[in-house]
Amino acid sequence: MVDQGPYIQGPEVERFEHDFARQFGLGHVVGVNTGTDAVAVALRALGVGPGDEVLTVALTAAGTGLGILMTGAEPRFVDVDPGTRTIDPAHLAASVTPRTAAVVPVHLHGFPAAMREVMACAHRHGLAVVEDCAQAHGAMCHGQPVGTWGHAAAFSFYPTKNLGTAGDGGAVATGDKLLAERIRMLAHSGWSDPRRISQAAAWNTRLDALQAAVLNVLLLHLEASNRERRAVAAAYRHHLTGLPVGLPPMDDGAVYHQFALTVADRDRLRADLEREFHIGTAVHYPVPLHCQPAFAPYARSRLPVTEQLADTLLSLPVQPEVVAGHEPQVAAAVRWCLGVTEKRRAA
Ligand SMILES: *Cc1c(COP(=O)(O)O)cnc(C)c1O
């Protein structure tokens, strides 16, 4: 590939766009440079811009909110459901205003958001829907792939994602051919024909050909790797039963980008696991978007469920290459640390 070129667009990018679309029934896929760009380009192609409000969640990566800001629209934050940890359909419906133009549900940790309810609300109010699938490549909602529910979907191929490349990468998917052409035009300098005349204020954001070549190999393994993540999750569930922790929702369509517990004394458990067992955990996400300076101007209210989860979520190691076969030890370590905490409390 390095010997052959071309390094911009070309057959590797075309093959990836085609194969990724076909594998998940996504219709049309346009590679871009990042997941953040994918959110922005998708919204812009759907006509979202300055003066508009876009509803999304605050329990997500910065890219969701930054992509909205890149269009000139204002993000508005909706609370999540405590069970699914994804957008709360009732709060969504209550948050629509005359300025609301779109909603960006996030399939957090690889769990499908409640897309039936989201789409029903969107139809009622004439909202565009861009699914943020950055953590959910291959996930299913009611047996239908995520990314096929909304008008468009944003994917990231950042190295840590379920389908992660060797650098930055992203894609927009849509079932609508005309929308796909508009997305491609907006991602490629506003060009819509070989004359390379910019037709609109656009971005230059492309999936790099070298990254596409990596993705073409990794795509072949995605479904197997998602199955392994589900097996890790099932083992964790089995071995963690009975402990004073909240487990992730049960959902056959989930692809476990994370396996996140909720636990009251999260920071202590995290420190104890690291110190006593050298088990590295993470928090996704400790500071919800509405509490970050970049988004504070758009925060209108507290989000109690989001804030509670941000204080209590703890992501256990879930990458199959790292943890497969070791789930009982990780669970035993959690059990030991929680027992110690109990003893300290009693003392
Ligand atoms: C990673 C991620 C993004 C941003 O993707 P980048 O490729 O890092 O720009 C957006 N949304 C969610 C939910 C993510 O996890």
Image (cartoon, rainbow, N blue to C red):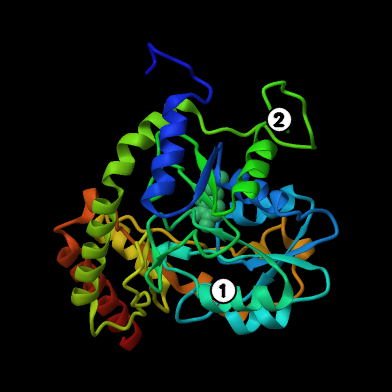
Query: Is residue 297 toward the left or the right of residue 56 in the image?
Result: right
Query: Is residue 176 toward the left or the right of residue 321 in the image?
Result: right
Q: Residue at the location (37% across, 18% down)?
A: 1
Q: Earlier in the sequence, mark 2 or mark 1?
A: 1
Task: Check disc 1: other Cα within 10 Å, few if <14, some if 14-19, many if 20+.
Answer: many
Q: Residue furthest top?
A: 3
Q: Secondary structure at mark 2?
A: loop
Can you tell which quarter of the image residue 15 is in?
A: top left
Q: Residue at the location (26% across, 64% down)?
A: 230
Q: Is residue 19 above or below residue 230?
A: above
> Could you tell me residue 83's position as x and y percent?
45, 81
Query: Is residue 158 toward the left or the right of residue 52 in the image?
Result: left
Q: Dot 1 corresponds to which residue?
A: 87
Can you tell which quarter of the image residue 47 is in?
A: bottom right
Examine the rendering and report whether any part of residue 160 can be seen.
no
Q: Residue furthest right?
A: 51
Q: Nearer the viewer, residue 254 or 284?
A: 254
Tell me the kind of residue under disc 1: Ile
Q: Nearer the viewer, residue 116 or 228?
A: 116
Q: Nearer the viewer, mark 2 or mark 1?
A: 2
User: Marks 2/1: CA distance?
Assistant: 35 Å
Q: Is residue 193 above or below residue 78?
A: above
Q: Residue furthest bottom?
A: 346
Examine the rendering and report whether any part of residue 285 can be seen.
yes
Task: Check disc 2: other Cα within 10 Å, few if <14, some if 14-19, many if 20+.
Answer: some
Query: Looking at the rendering, in which quadrant would you find the C terminus?
Result: bottom left
Q: Residue at the location (64% across, 41% down)?
A: 181
Tell me the kind of residue under disc 2: Trp
Mark sitting on residue 191: 2
